[in-house]
Image (tube, grey):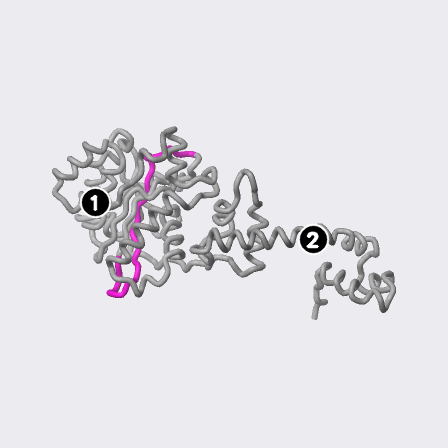
Amino acid sequence: MGAIHVPLRVKYEIIKKLRDAHSIRFLCHSADVSSSSYYAWKSRAPKRQEKQKEDERVVALIRTTCKKYLGKWGSKQVTMQISTPESPINHKRVARIMREHNLLSKRRRANPYKHIPKNGDDIEIAENLVNRQYAYTLLWPWRVFGTDLTFIRFNGGWAYLSVIKDFCTGEIIAHVLSLKPNTELVQKTLDIFALRVPLEDRLGGILHSDRGSVYTSKIRCNRTRELGLLVSMSRKGNCIDNAPTESFFGHMKDDLQNTNVMSFEDLRDAIDTYILEYNTVRKQWHRNKMTPVDYRNYLFGVDSRSLLFNVSTLRGAVQSPLSNILSVLSNRF
Protein backbone atom coordinates (compact mmCIF):
# COMPACT_ATOMS: atom_id res chain seq x y z
CA MET A 1 0.00 0.00 0.00
CA GLY A 2 1.45 3.37 -1.05
CA ALA A 3 2.25 6.22 1.29
CA ILE A 4 -0.51 8.72 2.07
CA HIS A 5 0.09 12.12 0.52
CA VAL A 6 -0.23 14.99 3.01
CA PRO A 7 -0.43 18.50 1.54
CA LEU A 8 2.31 20.91 2.62
CA ARG A 9 -0.26 23.29 4.07
CA VAL A 10 -1.46 20.57 6.45
CA LYS A 11 2.11 19.76 7.50
CA TYR A 12 2.84 23.40 8.24
CA GLU A 13 -0.35 23.73 10.30
CA ILE A 14 0.64 20.67 12.38
CA ILE A 15 4.14 22.06 12.94
CA LYS A 16 2.64 25.37 14.05
CA LYS A 17 0.42 23.64 16.62
CA LEU A 18 3.25 21.48 18.03
CA ARG A 19 5.99 24.11 18.06
CA ASP A 20 5.64 24.73 21.82
CA ALA A 21 6.23 21.03 22.62
CA HIS A 22 9.04 20.29 20.17
CA SER A 23 11.71 22.18 18.30
CA ILE A 24 10.93 23.48 14.82
CA ARG A 25 13.93 21.64 13.44
CA PHE A 26 12.74 18.29 14.84
CA LEU A 27 9.19 18.81 13.58
CA CYS A 28 10.34 19.83 10.09
CA HIS A 29 12.62 16.81 9.89
CA SER A 30 9.75 14.51 10.95
CA ALA A 31 7.41 16.08 8.39
CA ASP A 32 10.07 15.87 5.67
CA VAL A 33 10.07 19.62 4.99
CA SER A 34 12.81 22.20 5.31
CA SER A 35 12.85 24.72 8.13
CA SER A 36 13.22 27.56 5.62
CA SER A 37 10.08 26.55 3.77
CA TYR A 38 8.10 26.48 7.05
CA TYR A 39 9.30 29.96 8.03
CA ALA A 40 8.53 31.22 4.52
CA TRP A 41 4.98 29.84 4.86
CA LYS A 42 4.66 31.44 8.28
CA SER A 43 5.80 34.85 6.95
CA ARG A 44 3.06 34.75 4.31
CA ALA A 45 0.27 34.46 6.89
CA PRO A 46 -0.95 38.08 6.41
CA LYS A 47 -1.21 37.54 2.65
CA ARG A 48 -3.18 34.31 3.18
CA GLN A 49 -5.60 36.10 5.48
CA GLU A 50 -6.03 38.85 2.91
CA LYS A 51 -6.59 36.25 0.19
CA GLN A 52 -9.18 34.47 2.35
CA LYS A 53 -11.08 37.72 2.87
CA GLU A 54 -11.03 38.36 -0.87
CA ASP A 55 -12.27 34.80 -1.51
CA GLU A 56 -15.16 35.41 0.89
CA ARG A 57 -16.01 38.58 -1.02
CA VAL A 58 -16.00 36.68 -4.33
CA VAL A 59 -18.21 33.93 -2.86
CA ALA A 60 -20.72 36.53 -1.70
CA LEU A 61 -20.60 38.18 -5.13
CA ILE A 62 -21.22 34.87 -6.88
CA ARG A 63 -24.15 34.03 -4.60
CA THR A 64 -25.82 37.40 -5.12
CA THR A 65 -25.07 38.02 -8.80
CA CYS A 66 -25.59 34.47 -10.08
CA LYS A 67 -28.08 33.19 -7.51
CA LYS A 68 -30.58 32.13 -10.17
CA TYR A 69 -27.99 30.07 -12.04
CA LEU A 70 -25.98 28.42 -9.24
CA GLY A 71 -25.42 24.79 -10.12
CA LYS A 72 -26.16 25.57 -13.78
CA TRP A 73 -23.43 27.96 -14.91
CA GLY A 74 -19.78 26.94 -15.12
CA SER A 75 -16.85 28.92 -13.76
CA LYS A 76 -16.16 30.83 -16.99
CA GLN A 77 -19.76 31.97 -17.35
CA VAL A 78 -19.79 33.08 -13.71
CA THR A 79 -16.48 34.91 -14.21
CA MET A 80 -17.87 36.89 -17.13
CA GLN A 81 -20.86 37.93 -15.04
CA ILE A 82 -18.98 39.11 -11.93
CA SER A 83 -15.72 40.38 -13.41
CA THR A 84 -15.48 44.02 -14.55
CA PRO A 85 -12.65 46.08 -16.08
CA GLU A 86 -12.47 48.03 -12.82
CA SER A 87 -12.39 44.89 -10.67
CA PRO A 88 -11.16 41.93 -12.76
CA ILE A 89 -11.34 38.39 -11.35
CA ASN A 90 -9.34 35.52 -12.85
CA HIS A 91 -11.42 32.59 -14.07
CA LYS A 92 -9.06 30.07 -12.41
CA ARG A 93 -9.69 31.72 -9.06
CA VAL A 94 -13.44 31.57 -9.62
CA ALA A 95 -13.17 27.88 -10.55
CA ARG A 96 -11.22 27.13 -7.36
CA ILE A 97 -13.66 29.05 -5.16
CA MET A 98 -16.69 27.39 -6.78
CA ARG A 99 -15.08 23.99 -6.26
CA GLU A 100 -14.26 24.69 -2.61
CA HIS A 101 -17.80 25.94 -1.87
CA ASN A 102 -19.63 23.27 -3.91
CA LEU A 103 -21.02 25.73 -6.43
CA LEU A 104 -20.04 23.80 -9.56
CA SER A 105 -22.51 23.13 -12.36
CA LYS A 106 -23.99 19.69 -12.96
CA ARG A 107 -22.72 17.47 -15.74
CA ARG A 108 -25.25 16.91 -18.50
CA ARG A 109 -26.25 13.52 -19.86
CA ALA A 110 -25.52 12.50 -23.45
CA ASN A 111 -28.28 12.84 -26.02
CA PRO A 112 -29.99 9.60 -27.13
CA TYR A 113 -29.05 8.07 -30.46
CA LYS A 114 -31.08 9.43 -33.36
CA HIS A 115 -32.71 7.53 -36.19
CA ILE A 116 -30.72 7.96 -39.41
CA PRO A 117 -32.66 7.36 -42.66
CA LYS A 118 -31.33 6.21 -46.01
CA ASN A 119 -31.85 7.70 -49.45
CA GLY A 120 -35.30 7.11 -50.92
CA ASP A 121 -38.11 8.68 -52.92
CA ASP A 122 -39.21 11.07 -50.15
CA ILE A 123 -35.88 11.92 -48.55
CA GLU A 124 -32.62 13.56 -49.55
CA ILE A 125 -29.16 13.14 -48.05
CA ALA A 126 -27.09 16.27 -48.62
CA GLU A 127 -23.32 16.68 -48.58
CA ASN A 128 -21.58 17.84 -45.40
CA LEU A 129 -20.61 21.35 -46.55
CA VAL A 130 -19.63 22.59 -43.09
CA ASN A 131 -17.31 19.66 -42.33
CA ARG A 132 -16.80 20.86 -38.74
CA GLN A 133 -15.46 24.22 -39.93
CA TYR A 134 -17.75 26.03 -37.50
CA ALA A 135 -15.13 27.90 -35.49
CA TYR A 136 -16.60 31.36 -34.88
CA THR A 137 -13.30 33.01 -35.86
CA LEU A 138 -13.64 31.64 -39.41
CA LEU A 139 -17.22 32.80 -39.93
CA TRP A 140 -19.32 35.93 -40.33
CA PRO A 141 -22.80 36.54 -38.84
CA TRP A 142 -25.81 35.21 -40.77
CA ARG A 143 -23.78 33.02 -43.14
CA VAL A 144 -23.56 29.54 -41.56
CA PHE A 145 -26.38 28.18 -39.41
CA GLY A 146 -27.14 24.98 -37.56
CA THR A 147 -30.57 23.50 -36.90
CA ASP A 148 -31.77 20.66 -34.72
CA LEU A 149 -34.64 19.62 -32.46
CA THR A 150 -34.80 18.14 -28.99
CA PHE A 151 -37.45 16.77 -26.66
CA ILE A 152 -38.44 18.18 -23.26
CA ARG A 153 -40.78 16.60 -20.72
CA PHE A 154 -43.69 18.64 -19.35
CA ASN A 155 -46.73 17.65 -17.27
CA GLY A 156 -48.65 16.54 -20.35
CA GLY A 157 -45.97 14.37 -21.94
CA TRP A 158 -43.23 15.42 -24.34
CA ALA A 159 -42.70 18.72 -26.16
CA TYR A 160 -40.32 19.20 -29.06
CA LEU A 161 -38.15 22.28 -29.57
CA SER A 162 -36.74 23.21 -32.98
CA VAL A 163 -34.05 25.89 -33.26
CA ILE A 164 -31.81 27.56 -35.82
CA LYS A 165 -28.49 28.84 -34.47
CA ASP A 166 -25.90 31.18 -35.99
CA PHE A 167 -22.56 29.35 -35.78
CA CYS A 168 -20.60 32.61 -35.82
CA THR A 169 -22.27 34.52 -32.99
CA GLY A 170 -23.94 31.65 -31.11
CA GLU A 171 -27.29 33.47 -31.35
CA ILE A 172 -30.51 31.47 -31.50
CA ILE A 173 -32.12 33.00 -34.58
CA ALA A 174 -35.42 31.12 -34.52
CA HIS A 175 -37.17 28.59 -32.31
CA VAL A 176 -40.55 26.87 -32.17
CA LEU A 177 -42.03 24.54 -29.53
CA SER A 178 -44.52 21.89 -30.62
CA LEU A 179 -46.24 18.74 -29.44
CA LYS A 180 -45.15 16.83 -32.55
CA PRO A 181 -41.64 16.40 -34.02
CA ASN A 182 -42.76 16.61 -37.64
CA THR A 183 -41.91 18.47 -40.82
CA GLU A 184 -44.45 21.19 -40.00
CA LEU A 185 -42.44 22.09 -36.89
CA VAL A 186 -39.28 22.47 -38.98
CA GLN A 187 -41.15 24.52 -41.59
CA LYS A 188 -42.43 26.96 -38.94
CA THR A 189 -38.89 27.40 -37.67
CA LEU A 190 -37.75 28.24 -41.21
CA ASP A 191 -40.60 30.77 -41.54
CA ILE A 192 -39.45 32.59 -38.40
CA PHE A 193 -35.88 32.43 -39.66
CA ALA A 194 -36.98 34.10 -42.91
CA LEU A 195 -38.52 36.94 -40.90
CA ARG A 196 -35.42 37.32 -38.78
CA VAL A 197 -32.59 37.36 -41.31
CA PRO A 198 -32.83 39.59 -44.42
CA LEU A 199 -32.61 37.81 -47.78
CA GLU A 200 -29.55 39.77 -48.86
CA ASP A 201 -27.66 38.63 -45.74
CA ARG A 202 -28.58 34.94 -45.84
CA LEU A 203 -28.42 34.43 -49.63
CA GLY A 204 -25.83 31.76 -50.41
CA GLY A 205 -25.44 30.82 -46.74
CA ILE A 206 -25.46 27.29 -45.33
CA LEU A 207 -28.04 25.61 -43.08
CA HIS A 208 -26.54 22.52 -41.45
CA SER A 209 -28.50 19.71 -39.77
CA ASP A 210 -28.17 16.07 -38.83
CA ARG A 211 -29.79 13.23 -40.80
CA GLY A 212 -32.97 13.06 -38.74
CA SER A 213 -36.08 12.17 -40.73
CA VAL A 214 -37.56 15.68 -40.50
CA TYR A 215 -34.38 17.18 -41.99
CA THR A 216 -33.91 14.67 -44.81
CA SER A 217 -37.45 15.37 -46.02
CA LYS A 218 -37.38 16.73 -49.57
CA ILE A 219 -40.06 19.25 -48.56
CA ARG A 220 -37.74 20.68 -45.93
CA CYS A 221 -34.71 20.66 -48.23
CA ASN A 222 -36.60 22.44 -51.01
CA ARG A 223 -37.96 25.05 -48.58
CA THR A 224 -34.40 25.68 -47.33
CA ARG A 225 -33.23 26.35 -50.89
CA GLU A 226 -36.21 28.65 -51.49
CA LEU A 227 -34.88 30.81 -48.66
CA GLY A 228 -31.57 31.17 -50.49
CA LEU A 229 -29.61 28.69 -48.37
CA LEU A 230 -27.49 25.66 -49.22
CA VAL A 231 -28.41 22.38 -47.52
CA SER A 232 -25.71 20.64 -45.45
CA MET A 233 -26.01 17.48 -43.36
CA SER A 234 -23.82 15.70 -40.83
CA ARG A 235 -22.19 12.43 -41.68
CA LYS A 236 -23.88 9.23 -40.61
CA GLY A 237 -23.75 8.81 -36.83
CA ASN A 238 -21.62 11.94 -36.21
CA CYS A 239 -23.44 14.23 -33.78
CA ILE A 240 -20.21 16.24 -33.35
CA ASP A 241 -20.69 17.55 -36.90
CA ASN A 242 -23.51 19.66 -35.45
CA ALA A 243 -21.84 20.25 -32.07
CA PRO A 244 -22.65 24.01 -31.68
CA THR A 245 -26.41 23.34 -31.84
CA GLU A 246 -26.18 20.28 -29.59
CA SER A 247 -24.21 22.38 -27.10
CA PHE A 248 -27.04 24.89 -26.81
CA PHE A 249 -29.54 22.15 -25.99
CA GLY A 250 -27.20 20.87 -23.31
CA HIS A 251 -26.92 24.29 -21.65
CA MET A 252 -30.66 24.86 -21.88
CA LYS A 253 -31.58 21.55 -20.25
CA ASP A 254 -29.05 22.21 -17.49
CA ASP A 255 -30.60 25.62 -16.78
CA LEU A 256 -34.31 24.81 -17.15
CA GLN A 257 -35.37 22.91 -14.05
CA ASN A 258 -38.60 21.10 -13.12
CA THR A 259 -40.11 21.32 -16.61
CA ASN A 260 -42.05 18.11 -15.86
CA VAL A 261 -44.42 20.09 -13.62
CA MET A 262 -45.03 22.86 -16.18
CA SER A 263 -47.95 23.11 -18.56
CA PHE A 264 -47.18 23.40 -22.27
CA GLU A 265 -47.88 27.16 -22.19
CA ASP A 266 -45.65 27.66 -19.13
CA LEU A 267 -42.88 25.64 -20.78
CA ARG A 268 -43.12 27.73 -23.95
CA ASP A 269 -42.93 30.96 -21.93
CA ALA A 270 -39.95 29.61 -19.96
CA ILE A 271 -38.12 28.69 -23.18
CA ASP A 272 -38.89 32.08 -24.75
CA THR A 273 -37.47 33.81 -21.67
CA TYR A 274 -34.44 31.52 -21.54
CA ILE A 275 -33.53 32.05 -25.20
CA LEU A 276 -33.95 35.82 -24.85
CA GLU A 277 -31.55 35.74 -21.87
CA TYR A 278 -29.21 33.36 -23.71
CA ASN A 279 -28.99 35.81 -26.62
CA THR A 280 -28.80 39.04 -24.61
CA VAL A 281 -27.53 38.20 -21.07
CA ARG A 282 -25.39 35.06 -21.12
CA LYS A 283 -21.86 36.07 -22.15
CA GLN A 284 -19.59 33.69 -24.07
CA TRP A 285 -15.95 33.35 -23.15
CA HIS A 286 -14.45 32.99 -26.62
CA ARG A 287 -16.59 35.68 -28.22
CA ASN A 288 -14.85 38.65 -26.59
CA LYS A 289 -16.82 37.82 -23.41
CA MET A 290 -19.92 39.25 -25.11
CA THR A 291 -23.47 37.98 -25.45
CA PRO A 292 -24.39 36.56 -28.88
CA VAL A 293 -26.39 39.68 -29.82
CA ASP A 294 -23.65 42.03 -28.62
CA TYR A 295 -21.03 40.04 -30.54
CA ARG A 296 -23.10 40.09 -33.72
CA ASN A 297 -23.67 43.83 -33.45
CA TYR A 298 -20.00 44.32 -32.60
CA LEU A 299 -19.07 42.63 -35.90
CA PHE A 300 -21.73 44.51 -37.83
CA GLY A 301 -20.87 47.77 -36.05
CA VAL A 302 -24.50 48.68 -35.32
CA ASP A 303 -26.56 49.75 -32.30
CA SER A 304 -27.30 46.66 -30.17
CA ARG A 305 -30.97 47.65 -29.88
CA SER A 306 -31.64 47.88 -33.61
CA LEU A 307 -31.84 44.13 -34.32
CA LEU A 308 -33.50 42.73 -31.20
CA PHE A 309 -35.91 39.87 -31.72
CA ASN A 310 -39.60 40.15 -30.75
CA VAL A 311 -40.79 36.61 -30.00
CA SER A 312 -44.52 37.31 -29.75
CA THR A 313 -44.65 39.24 -33.04
CA LEU A 314 -42.94 36.52 -35.03
CA ARG A 315 -44.91 33.75 -33.34
CA GLY A 316 -48.14 35.39 -34.41
CA ALA A 317 -46.84 35.93 -37.93
CA VAL A 318 -45.93 32.28 -38.35
CA GLN A 319 -49.45 31.24 -37.45
CA SER A 320 -50.80 33.55 -40.17
CA PRO A 321 -51.02 33.00 -43.95
CA LEU A 322 -47.92 33.43 -46.09
CA SER A 323 -49.13 36.83 -47.33
CA ASN A 324 -49.13 38.14 -43.73
CA ILE A 325 -45.62 36.79 -43.20
CA LEU A 326 -44.37 38.64 -46.27
CA SER A 327 -46.07 41.79 -45.02
CA VAL A 328 -44.31 41.58 -41.67
CA LEU A 329 -41.03 40.92 -43.45
CA SER A 330 -41.36 43.95 -45.72
CA ASN A 331 -42.29 46.25 -42.81
CA ARG A 332 -39.40 45.03 -40.68
CA PHE A 333 -36.65 45.22 -43.27
Residue 264 at what x, y percent from top left? Answer: 24, 59
Disc 1: CA contacts within 10 A as few (<14), some (14-19) or many (>=20): many
For the magenta stretch, what is the residue range?
138-159
Disc 2: CA contacts within 10 A as few (<14), some (14-19) or many (>=20): few
- Towards the viewer: 291 or 181: 291
Vertically, is 153 above or below 125? below
Quadrant for residue 137, please give it: top left
Residue 324 at what x, y percent from top left? Answer: 13, 39
Quadrant for residue 232, please give it: top left
Query: Which is more N-terminal, label 2 or label 1?
Result: 2
Q: Is mark 1 on a helix, strand or loop?
A: helix
- Main SS category, magenta section: strand
Residue 5 at what x, y percent from top left? Answer: 70, 64
Residue matched to label 2: 48
Residue 220 numbered mark, or none: 1
Which residue appears at 33% of the width and 48% of the height?
275
Query: In the picture, which quadrant includes the N terminus?
Result: bottom right
Which residue appears at 23% of the width and 46% of the height?
312
Q: How many labels does the image show?
A: 2
- Towards the viewer: 139 or 21: 21
Residue 232 placement, left or right of 281: left
Give, as a three-letter code, the residue at label 1: Arg
Vertically, is 86 above or below 21? above
Between circles 1 and 2, the one closer to the viewer is: 2
Which residue appears at 46% of the width and 52% of the height?
66
Residue 306 at what x, y percent from top left? Answer: 31, 33
Query: In the picture, which quadrant includes the C terminus?
Result: top left
